[in-house]
Image: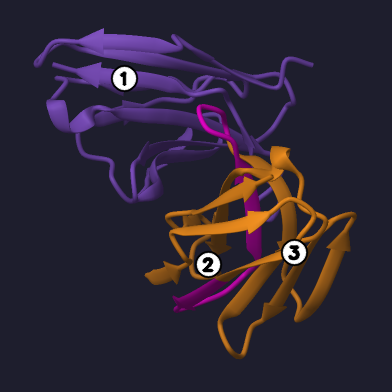
């Protein structure tokens, strides 16, 4: 099994940068996903990390350190539309399918 | 492509009633799964399937049944609804075990 921890809520100003941390403990690791979920909507894929390092995709970047069981999602040049919940999800290696285990999500509130 | 579709969008049941939540995808994905999402708890896996005719239990399978007779469809059956099953249910699909999951729009279920 695994535990996934991320902050419950973060507030930031439009145009600023916010970093959402995710720590995990797992018996096996086979990748980490970040999803964005707006209120009342389905989660949508943002990024995937399986090797250590930084993955950059426009205003969003995701970092992974497997030895530390740690990832972060960096949101730059925040826009009002970035107000959403951000879900960290870890895939285990011990399962033939590789089920995803989700964290509870971090609610990001962007203020004018 | 419609992606992942779910019906109904909203449903109210009385305790003890049964019903089926429908899920279909038109992306020819082998992997499909059902999650429930409750406040503060993140997405929890109910059942999943790695292909037609193959299903397995997730983290919270009690009170739910699934079947996968075709690649496209993956219905979730509530056998005897209980208030504890009040939740938002998401169906998801992915091409392979390490690929991103695509989520349906969700079904908001209330059990009275």
Determine the residue positioned at 52% across, 32% down.
A39
The residue that label 2 is drawn on is: A92
Which numbered disc, 1 or 2, marks the residue closer to the eye?
1
| Callout 1 and callout 2 share a chain | no
Classify B30 as above or below A69.
above
What chain does badge 3 belong to? A
Quadrant where the C terminus of chain A is found in the figure: top right
Q: Are marks 3 and 1 in contact (CB under 8 Å)?
A: no
Of the pair A111 and B50, the residue shown nearer to us:
A111
Determine the residue positioned at 46% across, 12% down.
B9
Which numbered disc, 3 or 1, marks the residue closer to the eye?
3
Of the pair B16 and A80, the residue shown nearer to us:
A80
Q: Secondary structure at mark 1?
A: strand
Region in magenta: A22-42
Mark pair 3, 2: CA separation: 30 Å
The residue that label 3 is drawn on is: A17
Which numbered disc, 3 or 2, marks the residue closer to the eye?
3
Q: Residue furthest front?
A: A112
Report crowding for label 3: few under 14, some 14 to 19, many 20 or more residues within 10 A (C-alpha).
Answer: some
**Image side of residue B21 versus residue B28, left or right:** left
What chain does badge 2 belong to? A
């Amino acid at each position: 099994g695994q535990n996934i921890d991320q902050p419950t809520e973060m507030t930031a100003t439009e145009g600023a940068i916010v970093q959402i941390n995710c720590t995990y403990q797992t018996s096996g690791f086979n990748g980490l996903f970040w999803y964005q979920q707006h209120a009342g909507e389905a989660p949508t894929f943002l990024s995937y990390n399986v090797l250590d390092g930084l993955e950059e995709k426009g205003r969003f970047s995701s970092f992974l350190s497997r030895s530390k069981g740690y990832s972060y999602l960096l949101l730059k040049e925040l826009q009002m539309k970035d107000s959403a919940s951000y879900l960290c999800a870890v895939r285990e290696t011990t399962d033939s399918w590789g089920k995803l285990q989700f964290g509870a999500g971090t609610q990001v509130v962007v203020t004018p | 492509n419609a992606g992942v579709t779910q019906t109904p969008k909203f449903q109210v049941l009385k305790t003890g009633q049964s019903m089926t939540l429908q899920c279909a995808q038109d992306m020819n994905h082998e992997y499909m799964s059902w999650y429930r999402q409750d406040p503060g708890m993140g997405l929890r896996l109910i059942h999943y399937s790695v292909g037609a005719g193959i299903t397995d239990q997730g983290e919270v399978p009690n009170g739910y049944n699934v079947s996968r007779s075709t690649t496209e469809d993956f219905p979730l059956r509530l056998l005897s609804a209980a208030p504890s099953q009040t939740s938002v249910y998401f169906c998801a699909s992915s091409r392979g075990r390490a690929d991103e999951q695509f989520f349906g729009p969700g079904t908001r279920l209330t059990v009275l």
